[in-house]
């Protein structure tokens, strides 16, 4: 019998023989990423390597109480200022991939230490809400494609966009990064954007998944929300985007949903996202999100960003003590590797560092003109006549707010102000007024305290203009253009006072200018350079026209001038309601939530705020679903927007009035005015109420015509499927189309319906069955209409 030692010796000798045979044959004994299958590569990885891959190597935080980052965190970044990256594993040929924000463009540092040869500016595109207000998937696709090209050219593998949380409340600090209050509009626009980015071989990360609708204590806030509201409102847009565009990655959100961190929720990240929706990519946390690395791994949150050293150790320990199975760990690793296989870093595409910024600027300007919304235009004040003599008022006329702050900001090379845009378009502006504003703004900016990194600088007060000067300008100039500006950003929500509502001086200013100009029979145009809704109802009668320019990106001044001068006819419509007053907002009382006293901190980071909760007591009645169902008239409703021309709609025809599996709705839109223009056509469905209460109407589809000449018509058709008729019945965990008469309503806004047709459903249809998921532990008392 051979002794144990000699058996070992034999095994070692046999191993050496095998290895040397492989070497002789010129084979690498180790599997190599890309050459061998992902499974073979995973099999060759140590647990430490797997854990390392799943924990980013982005930040080296010097926070008391947190472990110092290991040395490999200090490997110099390839793209300076990117938000994060993954660990390479050179032994197996696995490269590091680089991730950069964000929704309005590629956020990286514009300059690099020791490199004076060139700059790394990226294009600042219009904010997401403007893009959605174009109601044009082609616009979203072009903007996505342009950002994808810049990302690729700067060596970025995954763009941390689009952001698509629902505008639950107009004060949401990051609403500007998000599309809309409606999930169908959000989902369709996001899908088109993702397809645009990914067509360049660069990935996206749709975020923040999910129910992350306020900034207040955002890392410890629990969104308490019913399963129905989650499914119909807060998850539906993600579902559409994932199914229609297969984003490479999803970013889980900071908040908890009904008591569990989104990043630690297996129901959210595995049962729903993978099993129900068939998502194939990987999930990453938001930066420092969640609290338990092992729970995150078990939930299917594959990568922890930006990565803190002890997370790797926690994962290794969990595998050793059995709280994380090798199978789960391998699944997470495989998902990440499958995406790295697609990445530019793996394909070793050399990046040029020379994106075509001029082309992007053109796309940014055009997109901006497509998404601005004309809210008011009495007696066709707009467009202005060529070379009109303008008195241009308002700080942000001279210092345009191109986009919001925080990770949704972009280091752009320039911002075209409205003053420059109007001057370039040939309008005559008052040089001394310009000088006064420019000096005032410079002086105020020099005086204000420097904001903390990523934080929004304090807004500067509106420059007071003496009444005498206003009167003199009213004599001398043909028209007054007054810009009102608002900014917002990550970490804080907006306020009602001096933000949603105009400040006293702003209101007085609008009034003084209006009185002075109207006294001379001159007109007053207001341009809103804002991130989201503000109160308009109380002052709109003072002015003749209002153009909602949003935050229109770096070429915004040119885009506004294109519309004011009539070079482009406005065609944007509201992606979010402008209520009469903040009091009317359905979540006015419960937003942004409250701090929970006596609860222990869930997060170990000092910047994580306090434990809090936001109770979504309005349920599914968010935005127009609330206003239209409860008969509350907004200042400007969802889907509203004017044009310099007019359109008529023919009667809508349905392919059948008895629903079986699909129906086609067809109509013709005609330009009945005297300027070329584009029209957004909106299709809403009103569903019968049997067991479930329903909103008065819900957007199901939309289309935008091409540029129609005066008198020209275009046929528009929509396909309605069973999923367009459903509501989510939580008691049966099913999407159900109830029997009865549906109304298909086609119109110019959610309140302005031009033509309707009846559609009968003979008997109830269970369109999809699900499992009970994610809901609150106890029944939530939600708002309901009385009938
Ligand atoms: C934001 C994310 C962003 C990440 C990386 C976080 O603070 O919530 O949207 O992608 O930072 O910059």
Image (cartoon, helix red, strand yellow):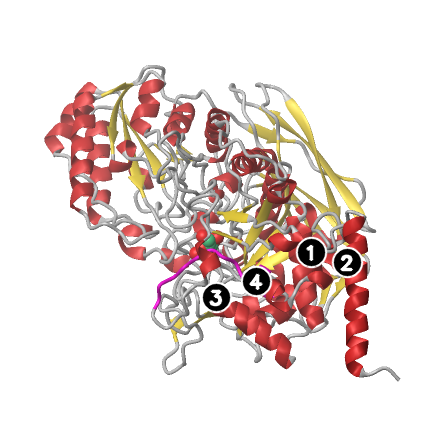
Majority secondary structure of the magenta segment?
Answer: loop
Q: Mark 4 = which residue?
A: 52
Q: Position of residue 454 (x, y in %)?
A: 35, 51
| Nearest-to-viewer mark from 2 and 1 | 2
Graded by Cα atoms within 10 Å as few (under 14), some (14 to 19) or many (20 or more), the crowding at tag 4 reads: many
Note whether 759 is above or below 376 in the view shown.
below
Q: Mark 1 = which residue?
A: 279
| Nearest-to-viewer mark from 4 and 2 | 2
User: How far is the residue under mark 2 from the one under mark 3?
Assistant: 35 Å
Note whether 543 is above or below 168 in the view shown.
above
Indicate the quadrant where residue 676 lies. top right
Note whether 686 is above or below 65 in the view shown.
above
Numbered disc 3: secondary structure: helix
Ligand 1 contact, mark 4 (Cβ < 8 Å): no
Graded by Cα atoms within 10 Å as few (under 14), some (14 to 19) or many (20 or more), the crowding at tag 2 reads: some
Position of residue 742 in the picture relative to residue 82 (left or right) = right
Numbered disc 4: secondary structure: helix
- Pick whichever of labels 2 and 1 is earlier in the sequence: 2
Q: Mark 3 = which residue?
A: 309
Residue at horizontal 89 percent and vertical 84 percent from the top = 1
Q: Position of residue 12 (x, y in %)?
A: 77, 69
- Pick whichever of labels 4 and 2 is earlier in the sequence: 2
| Nearest-to-viewer mark from 2 and 3 | 2
Q: Which residues are magenta?
A: 51-63
Position of residue 150 in the picture relative to residue 531 (left or right) = right
Q: Which mark is residue 19?
A: 2
User: How far is the residue under mark 3 from the one under mark 4?
Assistant: 9 Å
Ligand 1 contact, mark 3 (Cβ < 8 Å): no
């Amino acid at each position: 019998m051979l002794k144990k030692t000699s058996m070992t010796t034999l095994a070692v000798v046999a191993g050496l023989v095998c290895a040397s045979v492989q070497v002789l044959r010129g084979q690498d004994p180790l599997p190599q990423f890309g050459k061998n299958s992902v499974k073979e590569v995973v099999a060759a990885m140590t647990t430490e390597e797997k854990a390392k891959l799943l924990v980013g190597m982005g930040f080296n935080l010097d926070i008391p109480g947190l472990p110092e980052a290991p040395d490999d965190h200090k490997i110099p970044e390839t793209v300076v200022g990117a938000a994060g990256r993954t660990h390479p594993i050179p032994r197996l040929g696995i490269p590091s991939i680089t991730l950069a924000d964000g929704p309005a463009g590629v956020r990286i540092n514009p300059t690099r230490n020791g490199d004076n040869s060139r700059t790394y500016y990226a294009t600042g595109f219009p904010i997401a809400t403007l893009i959605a207000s174009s109601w044009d998937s082609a616009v979203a696709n072009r903007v996505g494609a342009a950002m994808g090209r810049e990302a690729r050219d700067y060596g970025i593998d995954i763009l941390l966009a689009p952001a698509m949380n629902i505008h639950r409340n107009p004060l949401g600090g990051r609403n500007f990064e998000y599309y809309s209050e409606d999930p169908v509009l959000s989902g369709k626009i996001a899908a088109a954007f993702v397809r645009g980015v990914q067509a360049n071989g660069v990935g996206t990360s749709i975020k923040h998944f999910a129910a992350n609708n306020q900034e207040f204590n955002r890392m410890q806030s629990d969104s308490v929300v019913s399963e129905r509201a989650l499914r119909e409102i807060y998850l539906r847009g993600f579902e559409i985007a994932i199914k229609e565009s297969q984003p490479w990655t999803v970013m889980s959100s900071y908040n908890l949903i009904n008591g569990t961190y989104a990043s630690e929720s297996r129901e959210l990240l595995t049962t729903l996202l993978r099993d129900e929706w068939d998502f194939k990519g990987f999930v990453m946390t938001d930066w420092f999100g969640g609290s338990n690395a092992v729970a995150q791994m078990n939930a299917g949150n594959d990568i922890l960003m930006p990565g803190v050293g002890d997370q790797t150790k926690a994962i290794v320990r969990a595998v050793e003590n059995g709280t994380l199975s090798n199978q789960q760990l391998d699944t997470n690793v495989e998902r990440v590797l499958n995406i790295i296989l697609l990445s530019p870093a793996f394909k070793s595409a050399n990046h040029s560092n020379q994106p075509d910024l001029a082309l992007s600027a053109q796309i940014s300007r055009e997109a901006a003109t497509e998404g601005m919304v004309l809210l008011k235009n009495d007696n066709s004040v707009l467009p202005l006549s060529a070379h009109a003599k303008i008195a241009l008022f308002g700080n942000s006329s001279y210092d345009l707010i191109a986009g919001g702050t925080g990770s949704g900001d972009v280091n752009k090379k320039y911002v075209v102000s409205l003053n420059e845009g109007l001057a370039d378009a040939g309008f005559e502006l008052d040089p001394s007024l310009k000088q006064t504003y420019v000096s005032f703004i410079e002086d105020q900016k020099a005086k204000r305290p420097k904001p903390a990194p990523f934080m929004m600088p304090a807004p500067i007060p509106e420059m007071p203009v003496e009444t005498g000067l206003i009167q003199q300008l009213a004599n001398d100039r043909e028209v007054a253009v007054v810009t009102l500006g608002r900014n917002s950003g990550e970490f804080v929500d907006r306020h009602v006072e001096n933000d949603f509502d105009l400040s006293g001086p702003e209101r007085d200013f609008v009034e003084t200018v209006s009185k002075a100009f109207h006294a001379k029979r001159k007109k007053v145009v207001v341009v809103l350079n804002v991130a989201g809704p503000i109160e308009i109802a109380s002052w709109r009668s003072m002015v003749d026209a209002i153009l909602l320019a949003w935050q229109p990106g770096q070429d915004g001044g040119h885009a506004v001038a294109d519309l004011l001068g009539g070079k482009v006819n406005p065609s944007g419509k509201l992606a979010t309601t402008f209520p009469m007053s903040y009091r009317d907002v359905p979540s006015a009382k419960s937003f942004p939530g409250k701090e929970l006293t006596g609860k222990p901190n869930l997060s170990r980071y000092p910047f994580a705020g306090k434990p809090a909760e936001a109770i979504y007591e309005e349920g599914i009645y968010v935005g127009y679903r609330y206003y239209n169902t409860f008969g509350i008239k907004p200042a400007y409703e969802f889907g509203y927007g004017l044009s310099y021309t007019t359109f008529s709609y023919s009667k809508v025809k349905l392919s059948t009035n008895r629903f079986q599996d699909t129906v086609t709705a067809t109509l013709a839109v005609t330009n009945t005015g005297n300027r070329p223009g584009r029209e957004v056509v909106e299709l809403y469905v009103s569903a019968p109420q049997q067991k479930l209460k329903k909103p008065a109407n819900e957007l199901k589809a939309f289309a935008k015509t091409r540029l129609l000449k005066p008198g020209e018509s275009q046929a528009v058709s929509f396909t309605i499927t069973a999923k367009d008729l459903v509501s989510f019945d939580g008691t049966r965990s099913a999407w159900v189309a109830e029997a009865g008469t549906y109304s298909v309503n086609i119109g110019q806004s959610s309140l302005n319906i031009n033509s309707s047709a009846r559609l009968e459903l003979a008997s109830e249809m269970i369109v999809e069955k699900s499992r009970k998921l994610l809901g609150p532990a106890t029944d939530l008392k939600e708002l309901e209409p009385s009938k």
